[in-house]
Amino acid sequence: MIQRILQTEITKLLKTFPAVCILGPRQVGKTTLGKTIAATFKKTALYLDLENPLDRRRLSDPFTFLTDNSNRCVIIDEVQIMPKLFSVLRSVIDADRKNGRFILLGSASPQLVKGVSESLAGRIAYRELPPLNIQELPVNIDKNRHWLRGGFPPSLLSRSEAASTEWLNGFIRSYVERDLSILFGVEFTASITARLLSMLAHTHGQLWNAETIARSIGITAPTVTRYVDYLQGAYLVHRLQPFYINTLKRLVKAPKIYIRDSGLLHNVSNITSLHTLLGHPLAGNSWEGYVIEQILQMLPSGLQLYYYRTQAGAECDMVIARDVHAIASIEVKLNNAPSLSKGYYQSIEDLKTKKNYVIVPDIETYKTNEGVVVCNLKDFIHNHLSKIK
């Protein structure tokens, strides 16, 4: 079993909170992680899967059932299927406030699930479990395989590229035809969702423009935005927001859109091998999105990730900031011998960042004459990211 970085943090949180909710896309390993953590406790665990009709029936009177099992750690999988549980949990926890009582597993953002209106503030901690990060890879899996196949364990650990592709085909088909409707209780048109995913792959790493995508698909811009909101709520898509500073410069204010898992991106784009990927027009944007996602997963608490662009041509792929203060400017290049643009240096001047990096696939770390650190992704995450404060 692959050790997840989040395991230690969640174990500590369960000693402080009555409930911890682990969120993330389906098939990412939430159930395995929840059961693994619960197995380390002295009290026995009870696992309920709300996609199982028998388990839903056991919760026909949730307050009584959960109260009767107050001496056990109760794991509730796909908790968003029964939104009323959130309000019941508040009463159950307040009736017997002990830490580590519940591990909730969810595949949808609580903010987008109908009926989740009761606040569990002070009673629950939320953490996202993303696909496997580059820091979590088994020793026999390299960065290129991770980039190509993505971080979903069934895809990454498949014995062949064909098996990985087959799993991703089924995963995407399930989301398009079934899962999104089940997760959010909203009807989705499968053909629209499939075409939208294709358009999102085509515009991966580009500025978000709902009107352009809507015209391509033949629906309205508000409908496109609504669908993307739900894809983001299912942890499949990310909007990287622009960094605003108090300046007279004309800034680009639209977010950039990314399909979060590189394996999903490549599958939608019919990229099935590293050779095909490296020769594909999407390669540069794919590498950029892969790097952004890995850093986003490992970003220290209190820091935020943005991009920066002005109408005059200053541009930076990533800005790490604390509140309104830019701390680091990061450029992403697929070339191991990167040539840095005037726009990147202009962004450093605009943002006045003292820590500046270029991340490339494979290279020994060095510093340019201008003080920019050039390094590979794993070295940046392992040796530099934690020092950005």
Image (spheres, rainbow, N blue to C red):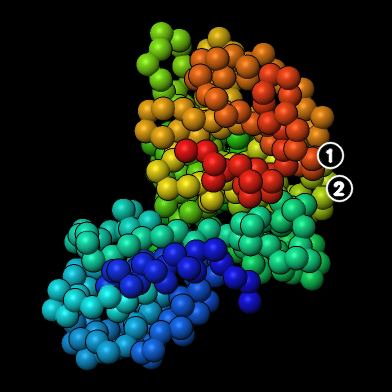
In the image, residue 243 lies at what x, y percent? Answer: 45, 27
The answer to which image quadrant residue 316 occupies is: top right
Q: In this picture, is 49 found above or below 370?
A: below
Q: Residue at x 37, y 33 (%)?
A: 323
* Disc assigned to residue 279: 1
- Which of the pair 227/256 is nearer the observer? 256
Q: CA distance from mark 2 to mark 1?
A: 7 Å
In the image, residue 204 lies at what x, y percent? Answer: 61, 38
Q: In this picture, is 82 found above or below 347?
A: below
The answer to which image quadrant residue 19 occupies is: bottom left
* Disc assigned to residue 227: none
- In this picture, residue 372 sits left or right of residue 387: right
Label 2 neighbour load within 10 Å: few <14, some 14-19, many 20+? few
As shown in the figure, which amino acid type bears the numbered disc 1?
Gly
In the image, residue 313 lies at what x, y percent? Answer: 59, 13
- In this picture, residue 115 sits left or right of residue 388: left
Q: Residue at x 57, y 19 (%)?
A: 348
As shown in the figure, which amino acid type bears the numbered disc 2?
His
Q: Which residue is mark 2?
A: 275
Q: Are marks 2 and 1 in contact (CB under 8 Å)?
A: yes
Q: In this picture, is 377 found above or below 272?
A: above
Q: Residue at x 50, y 74 (%)?
A: 33
Q: Please, what secondary structure does the residue beneath circle 1 have? A: loop
**Label tally:** 2
Q: Quadrant of the N terminus?
A: bottom right
* Residue 241 seen in the figure: no
Q: Residue at x 46, y 44 (%)?
A: 228
